[in-house]
Image (spheres, helix red, strand yellow):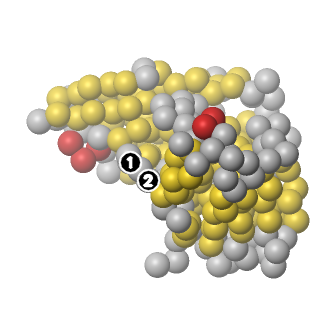
């Protein structure tokens, strides 16, 4: 399967704990995106990378959130000191460098903060 | 501020009953308009990209159209397997990369 892969699919954690999610994009795609989606809403942009460079971060991304793409391949999204409001589906997507190209999404990581 | 509004929020159709979903947008400069389908517990799946007013694209029972202010997703003779949430998104000219701004979606239920 050459699609976008996310791990884990589900994560249940207690408030205050740290969590980390991984995304493996389509191999030839230079751009990688993180989105967050809550029930009944569309995905909201969090951040994106071109190769290993993080080029944009949303105001939604508080200081507790950090994302990395160390070698321009896979990416990790870490949430420190989780809060109940962090409960959501975290989606990763990738695209080619060509401007205007569609995004290919993974199946997401569903986070529940108790 | 760029805005994408979808209507209706939910739609229930009988099998074979054609209808349209609406996506209206207010953006500073449209680079492209995208339609995605999302099944419960899964990520969005790409359907169409439209770049300029007057453009149309078709795939099986779905047809997407674009004007300067809105896009329609027409569903002809739908089947139960078309049940899903349909998301509209825009990419803007001044936006970074291929960043998309999504609407809240239309939840479609097709019944036998």
Picture coordinates of residue A86, whole percent (x, y): 64, 41
Query: Viewed as shown, does residue B20 lie left or right of B100?
Result: left
Q: Residue at x 58, y 48 (%)?
A: A14
Picture coordinates of residue B83, whole percent (x, y): 29, 40
Identify whether A96 is placed above or below B82. below
Residue marked by disc 2 = B42
Q: Nearer the viewer, residue A4 or A18?
A: A18
Q: Read off the chain for label 2.
A: B
Secondary element under disc 2, as helix, strand or loop, is loop
Picture coordinates of residue B33, whole percent (x, y): 62, 40
Residue marked by disc 1 = B39
Marking on residue B82: none
Secondary element under disc 1, as helix, strand or loop, is loop
Q: Residue at x 62, y 72 (%)?
A: A24
Query: Viewed as shown, does residue B87 lie left or right of B39?
Result: right
Q: Nearer the viewer, residue A14 or A29?
A: A14
Q: Read off the chain for label 1.
A: B
Labels 1 and 2 touching (C-beta < 8 A): yes
Q: Residue furthest top?
A: B8
Instruction: Give residue B32's quadrant in the image.
Output: top right
Identify whether A51 is placed above or below A59. below
Query: Can residue B91 be seen in the rendering of this structure?
Result: yes
Distance in Å between CA atoms under marks 1 and 2: 6 Å
Q: Residue furthest left?
A: B112
Query: Viewed as shown, does residue A56 lie left or right of B22?
Result: right
Picture coordinates of residue A90, whole percent (x, y): 59, 51
Q: Residue at x 69, y 56 (%)?
A: A18
Q: Nearer the viewer, residue A87 or B66?
A: A87
């Amino acid at each position: 399967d050459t699609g976008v892969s996310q791990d884990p699919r589900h994560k249940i954690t207690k408030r205050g704990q740290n969590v980390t999610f991984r995304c493996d994009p389509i191999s030839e795609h230079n751009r990688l995106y993180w989105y967050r989606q809550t029930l009944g809403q569309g995905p909201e942009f969090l951040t994106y990378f071109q190769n290993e460079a993080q080029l944009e971060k949303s105001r939604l991304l508080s200081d507790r959130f950090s994302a990395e793409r160390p070698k321009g391949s896979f990416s990790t999204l870490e949430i420190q000191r989780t809060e109940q409001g962090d409960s959501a589906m975290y989606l990763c997507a990738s695209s080619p460098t060509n401007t205007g190209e569609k995004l290919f999404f993974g199946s997401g990581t569903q986070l529940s903060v108790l | 501020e760029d805005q994408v509004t979808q209507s209706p929020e939910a739609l229930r159709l009988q099998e074979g009953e054609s209808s349209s979903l609406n996506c209206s947008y207010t953006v500073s400069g449209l680079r492209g308009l995208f339609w995605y389908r999302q099944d419960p517990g899964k990520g969005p799946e790409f359907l169409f990209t439209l770049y300029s007013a007057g453009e149309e694209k078709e795939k099986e029972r779905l047809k997407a159209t674009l004007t300067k202010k809105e896009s329609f997703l027409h569903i002809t003779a739908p089947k139960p397997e078309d049940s899903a949430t349909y998301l509209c998104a825009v990419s803007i000219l001044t936006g970074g990369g291929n960043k998309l701004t999504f609407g809240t979606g239309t939840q479609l239920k097709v019944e036998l």
